[in-house]
Image (spheres, rainbow, N blue to C red):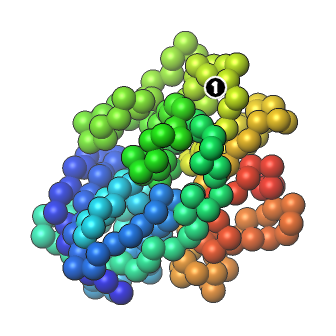
Amino acid sequence: MNLARVVENKSFYNYGVITFKTDKKLDIEPGQFLMMKSKDGYNLSKPFSVMDCKDFEFKVLIRNAGDFSKFLIKLKIGEELLFRGPYGSPFSKFIDFNKKYILIGGGCGSAPLMHLKKIYPNIIEDSVFGFSDYRIKSIVDDDNIFVDRIDGMNPVDYILNRNKGKDINIISCGPKGMFIYLKYIIDSYQTAWISMEENMGCGIGMCKGCPVDTVDGVKMVCKDGPLFNIKEVIL
């Protein structure tokens, strides 16, 4: 495994944006993820999508959802952890660079989409990143952060209404409930890709901890995804 050192930690109780620096030059494409663990070996490695990456630094967006995420949010400048990867197929393997895409993120599922938006701005038609806590705006700088419901709309309805009449292609990452709703409301001619998030132990398809049912049988999020056509996945 590789060693990473905290160089910036912008966190509050619910969320954290943490920047790590490492001695290894990194080449992490949007959609790929890292397996991270503490140096003491107390926990198994856990997957985290990368929000940004440049040379020797990478950034992750974390929600306080368990002991390890709480540990990460409390990391101080100079403290270290272990990581390996990147794993998973990059979004660029699946998407058509001659098309425009709308990005729909839910919570920390926004992280890989923000990475995609930064690396490939020319293919992004519009974006929305939904969160439940307004304080996220103090640590994530994006004009399309969506916190409160607007006119009774959720983030999915909001962004699709804002782009009504356009030739819509969608890339989404977030909770499964959002995918189910998205699959229910999009038209049959529209294209939507969903980046699945599952817990896993290895990141390479060995532990079988991240199965997803598809029309072609069971696949693994880590090695077959994380991006899938929404029409392929049985939600």
The residue pinned by badge 1 equals 160
Tell me: 77 left or right of 60: left
**Which residue is at a point 35% across and 83% down the rendered structure image?**
42
Nearer the observer, 200 or 14: 200
Tell me: 103 left or right of 193: left
**Which residue is at a point 87% across and 61% down the rendered structure image?**
215
Whole-percent x and y of residue 181?
Answer: 71, 37
Whole-percent x and y of residue 29?
Answer: 46, 63
The image quadrant that residue 24 belongs to is: bottom left
- Residue at the top extreme of this rendering: 151
Nearer the observer, 186 or 44: 186
**Is residue 178 at all visible to an observer of this figure?**
no
- Residue at the front extreme of this rendering: 98
In terms of secondary structure, where does tag 1 sit? helix
**Which residue is at a point 45% across and 24% down the rendered structure image?**
148
46 over 195 or under it: above or below: below
- Residue at the left extreme of this rendering: 78
The image quadrant that residue 164 belongs to is: top right
Tell me: 179 left or right of 233: left
Q: Amino acid at mark 1?
A: Leu
23 over 230 or under it: above or below: below
Nearer the observer, 155 or 124: 124
Whole-percent x and y of residue 156?
Answer: 61, 30
Q: The N terminus appears in which quarter of the rendering?
A: bottom left
**Which residue is at a point 35% across and 35% down the rendered structure image?**
142
Q: Bin the neighbour count of mark 1 within 10 Å (Cα to Cα): few under 14, some 14-19, many 20 and up.
A: many
Whole-percent x and y of residue 34?
Answer: 43, 71
Q: How many marks?
A: 1
